[in-house]
Amino acid sequence: MRKKIERPTYLQQLIDSRDNGLIKIVTGIRRVGKSYLLKTLFRDYLLEQDVTTDHILLIDLEDKKQAAFKDPDYLLDWVNEKMTDDEQYYIIIDEVQKVNDFVDMLGSLGLIDNADIYVTGSNSHFLSSDIATEFRGRGDEIHVYPLSFKEFMSVYEGDIVDGWQEYYTFGGLPKVLSIKGVDKKSTYLRNLYRTVYLKDIYDRHDIGNKAEFEELVRILASSIGGLVNPLNLANTFKSVKKLNNITDKTISTYIGYLEDAYLIEKSQRYDIKGKKYIGSSDKYYFKDMGLRNAILSFRQTEENHLMENIIYNEMRHRGFLVDVGNVEIRVINSEGKRERVTLEVDFVCNLGAKRYYLQSAYRIPDEEKMQQEKRSLGQIRDSFRKIVIIGERMQLRRDENGIILMGVYEFLKDESMLDI
């Protein structure tokens, strides 16, 4: 029997948003578990809270037997018939974009005083820009990421080392856990990328240069952990591919499509001492490592880059805003002259009054590498925690400057480790 995957972070967000008067909009890439979160985990929670089944109205537009609900008038009439008293009703609509004029329909549902509304939508018709435009002031977005490593390991049958290798290779889409065999997992992810995610983008946008678009996706997948500049990429297309019609504006537009479809996220550069953002170049991280690896046909699986991406995703899963930090210092060069040097902090993570500076270091074989990894952190003079995460098991320790060193397994498995 397949184990139940708990999603406590997102379930708690739904619980905290319950009865707040807003339409709860559950977003995320396809196959990430949005439907399961609402139809199973949240519904079970409501039943445990003594909400009766007749006060949970579930409409599943994935079910062909419920095709009549695509008519908004039919849906509204059905809801009106089911709501027979003044108690609170919970309306859950899966794949809401399949309802004709679904925005207006949700607006009508939102006028019902004793209705609390929860919806999911697919990427091709229900992207992040739609939510910002159509539901401003009326919607409460709950964005679901693929399984965190902790969630993954809660159902993975094996030790933590094997689990880590499986996770950074095949990612955290729930379905992948139930597929047996390396070849079948690889095939599933490659097919999913082409037949679902790419198709969603092509259905949504009129992209004439599909080959160039897919080449850009491969370049971004190869570049995790590296700065990306649209102008430089456009020049590369011109010089290497001999394509003069791929401009920096086109590159930026294409990257925007990938962000809007939840495949990638941008992390901006932040000047820590100057307390300001730096333009021109950013880093991009993939929401799921399995999809990223499938895009590259599993040919580039360097653990150091994948670990950095996973740390980024983990902090986003925990609700932090994550930037790339820059620290500018002055040094004496080989000619005896003072010059400015910019050091990088992998991640500056902010959530309310909390801030952490994180450095991802896959291996630290000697003291020279250790000093290199800690150098940028040592230049930051504030009192927030400065942490180096190392790609192996190790006991947490602090150096004489208060910089914390911890293993990646411990960091991913225990959220409290950042505050110890």
Image (cartoon, rainbow, N blue to C red):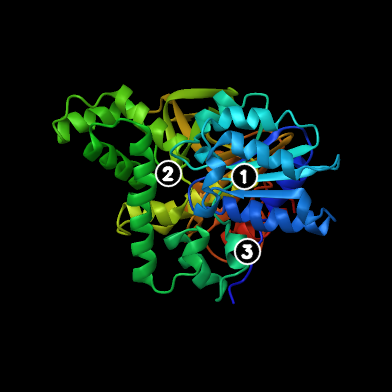
Report whether residue 353 is seen. Answer: yes
Under mark 2, the amino acid is Gly
Q: Which dot, 3 or 1, sits closer to the camera?
A: 1
Residue drawn at 70 percent across, 44 percent down: 91
* Residue labelled with disc 2: 225
Q: Closer to the camera, 27 or 406?
A: 27
Per the image, label 3 sits on a secondary structure element best described as loop
Earlier in the chain: of badge 3 and badge 1, it is 3
Residue drawn at 38 percent across, 49 percent down: 196
- How crowded is the residue under tag 2: few (<14 C-alpha within 10 Å), some, or many (20+)? many
* Residue 13 location (% of width, % of height): 71, 45
* Residue 215 location (% of width, % of height): 26, 41
| Residue farthest along the left direction in this orientation | 242
* Residue labelled with disc 3: 5
Q: Is 45 positioned to the left or the right of 87 in the image?
A: left
* Residue 101 location (% of width, % of height): 53, 30
* Residue labelled with disc 1: 93
Per the image, label 2 sits on a secondary structure element best described as loop
Under mark 3, the amino acid is Ile
Residue drawn at 23 percent across, 27 percent down: 246
Per the image, label 1 sits on a secondary structure element best described as strand
Q: Do labels 2 and 1 touch, CB within 8 Å?
A: no
* Residue 335 location (% of width, % of height): 36, 29
Quadrant for the N terminus, please: bottom right
Question: Does residue 390 sit above or below 116 in this rendering?
Answer: below
Question: Does residue 324 sit above or below 188 in this rendering?
Answer: above
Q: Is 71 positioned to the left or the right of 351 in the image?
A: left
Report whether residue 370 is seen. Answer: no
Under mark 1, the amino acid is Ile
Q: Closer to the camera, 279 or 407?
A: 279
Quadrant for the C terminus, please: bottom right
